[in-house]
Amino acid sequence: MGTPVHRSRPEVLADHSAAADRSVRLTPHLFHSHPAPALARLRQVTAVNSPAQDSPPPKPPAPATTSRRRWWFRLGALLVGLLPLTLFEAVLRVSDVARPADDPLAGIGGQRPLFERVGDVYRTARAKQNFFGTQEFPVAKPTNAFRIFAFGGSTVYGHPYLNDTAFPKWLELELAARAPGRQVQAINCGGISYASYRLAYVLREALRHQPDLVILAMGHNDFLEDRTYDNLKTDSVARHWLTERAASLRTVAWLRQKFSRTTAAPRGTDDSTTTAAEVDTRLDHSSAGYASYHRDADWHARVLRQFEHSFRAMLADCRAAKVPVIIITLGSNLRDCPPFKSEHRAGLSPAQEDQWQRHFDAATAADLRDDLPAALARYREAEAIDPQHALLAFRIARCLDRLGQPSVAREHYLRAKDEDICPLRMLERPYQFQHALAAESRTPLVDARTLLESLSPDALPGNDLYLDHVHPTLGGHQQIARALAAKVHELRLLPTAPAWPDDARRAAYTTHLQNLPPAYFANGRRRVDWLEKWAKRHKLHEETLPRDAFAWLRLGIRQYDLGEAQSSEASLALALKADPRTAPLLAAHGRDLVAQGRLGAEIIKCLPAGTNAVPAGR
C-alpha cells in the first residue's frame, strides 16, 4: 500500500462540491436515456456524495394497533405482578388475620398498658394514675364473677370526684344486690381528657381480661387535642384517598404488625407516631392553648370522622371477641353553660361586623334591665347578620327561656353548643351518630342525655343536674347506673331480680357514702375550680351569673352537691324570696337527696306544706 496522502479540510470539501456538481450535470442525461437504471444510479451517487452527518429519511409512524398492543402488554404485566399480593390479601381476609386499622388519621406511638400485674392482681399502672382512677381485679377470674369494663372520659371517671361516685360504681352496687351469689365488679376505664382514639388502645388491652360486658360512653373529649397533623392538613384529596385505601388493606396491616417496633395498634389507630404517647390537650398550654381554637370546618370534619372510625372499630373489636356492648350517649349543661369561645362567621365585612356589634350592645343593655322582648328583638337583628356567633345563640336561648318558650329556647341552646369555637361539650353529630350506629349494629343503647333531661324542668338541664359543662351530679350518676342495670336485666346478660327495693337501695347508698373520706366533696369543689380556670371560664364569668330565681335555685343545688353548705343556703334563700314557685322544686330536690342516701328520710317531714307537687316548667 502506498503512503496515505493527507489533505486539508478545505481540499476535502472542494472534492465533495465538485462531485455534487458532476451529479447534477449528469442527472438529465441519465433520466432521458435509461430512467430506471438512472434512478438507481442517482441514489448511489447521492449516497456516496452525501455528508456523513445527514439523517436518514424518517420512518413511517407505527400503526395504532401496535400502540394498543404495547399498552395491553404493560397492563397484563402489572396484573401478573399484583397477582401474588392479591392472593395474599384474599388469604388474610378469608382467615380473618391482620384486621386493618380503620382510621389512618389516628397515630399514637409508645402506648403503655393501663394495667400491670402485681402478684395475683392487675392494678392500674402508676404511670397512668394521673388520668385513670386506681382499679384492681384478680388475674384469675373467679367462676362466679361478672366483670364489666366501662370506657370513656372524665364523665366515666367520675370527675370532679373520683371513681367511688361514678356510675360504674353505682352499677356494681345495684347488680350485686340484684344478683346474689355473683361477684360483680365494674372496672372504671374512664380517662381524664381521653378521646375515643386513645380509648381504642385501652379497649384492646381490656379484652384480654375476660370482660362479660363493655360499656362505651364517649364523645366529649375528641376536640381537646390537635392531632390531625400538619401533613394531613395539607394533604390533597387524592393523597388522602390513597392513604385511606392503603390503610384498609390487610397486607399493609400484616406488614406493620411484623415489622413495627411497637406493639400492634388496635383498629381505629395507626402506627405513624404523629401524636404524643399521652394526653396533651391544647388548653394545657396556657399561653396559646385557648387562643389556638378558631373556626376551622376542615379540622372539625376530620375530628368527627376520626371519632366515628374509632367508635366503629371498638364495636368491631368487641364483636370479634364476642363481648356484649352497651352504648351510653352523654348529655351536657345547656341552661347554665355559655359557650367557651365565639367567633364571627367567615366573610363578614367590617361594616357588617360594626352593625352586628351595635345590635348586640343594644340588646345587652335591654337584657340587663330585664326588658326581655326588646332584648330579643335586637338579638334577632344581630342574628340576621351572623347566625353562627355562639354567644349570641346562647343569649337568644336565655331570653326565650325566661319568656316561657322552652322548646324554641332549646334549639338555640343546642346551636350555642354546636357553634362553640372551643367545643368541650359533645356536638349533635356525634350524639346522632351513636344512635344511628346502635340501630345499624343492633347494639343496646342507654340515652343518658335524654334521661337527665327528663329529670329537669322543661327538659333543659343546667346546674341542677351538671356540676359544670358536662359532668353529672352524684344523683345523675346514680340515675344512669339504674338505667344501665335495667338494660342488663332486659338483655338477660346477668340473671337479676327485676327490681331493688327503694329502702334497700337508699341504705346501700348511705353506707357507701359514709365510707368516703371527709373531704371528698370539698376536693371535688377544688377540681371544679381548676377545671374552670383551665377552660378560661373567667372570660365569660358574667354570663354564668344567675338572672332569675330559678337560676339561683339551680346554683344552690350545685353548691350543695359540691359541699358548699353556706353558699348553697344563701342561693336557695334568694331563690325562694324572688319567686315562691321555686319552693316545690326545692322540696322535690330534698326528696331526691334522701333517695341518693345523702339525707335522712326524716327530712321529708320538715318540708313545707303544699310542696309535694312540682310545678310544670322552670
Image (tube, helix red, strand yellow):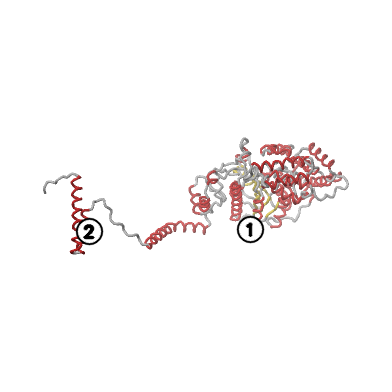
**Can you give x and y, in whole percent of width and height, for residue 614 in the image?**
83, 49
The residue that label 1 is drawn on is 440
Q: Is residue 537 left or right of residue 250?
A: right
Q: Is residue 162 visible?
A: no
Asked whether 20 or 295 is in front, the reply is: 20
Of the residues shown, which amino acid type is indicated by label 1? Glu
- Res. 568 mark: none
Sequence-wise, which precedes: disc 2 or disc 1? 2
Asked whether 278 or 169 is in front, the reply is: 278
Q: Secondary structure at mark 2?
A: helix
Marks 2 and 1 sit apart, C-alpha to C-alpha, by 83 Å
Which residue is rendered at x = 77% and y = 44% of the image? 374
Give the vertical position of 282 relative to 210 (above or below).
above
**Can you give x and y, in whole percent of width and height, for residue 554 in the image?**
78, 43
Q: Identify the residue at the far top of this view.
A: 287
The residue that label 2 is drawn on is 43
How packed mark 1 is, by other alpha carbons closer than 10 Å (few <14, some 14-19, many 20 or more), is few
Asked whether 251 or 170 is in front, the reply is: 251
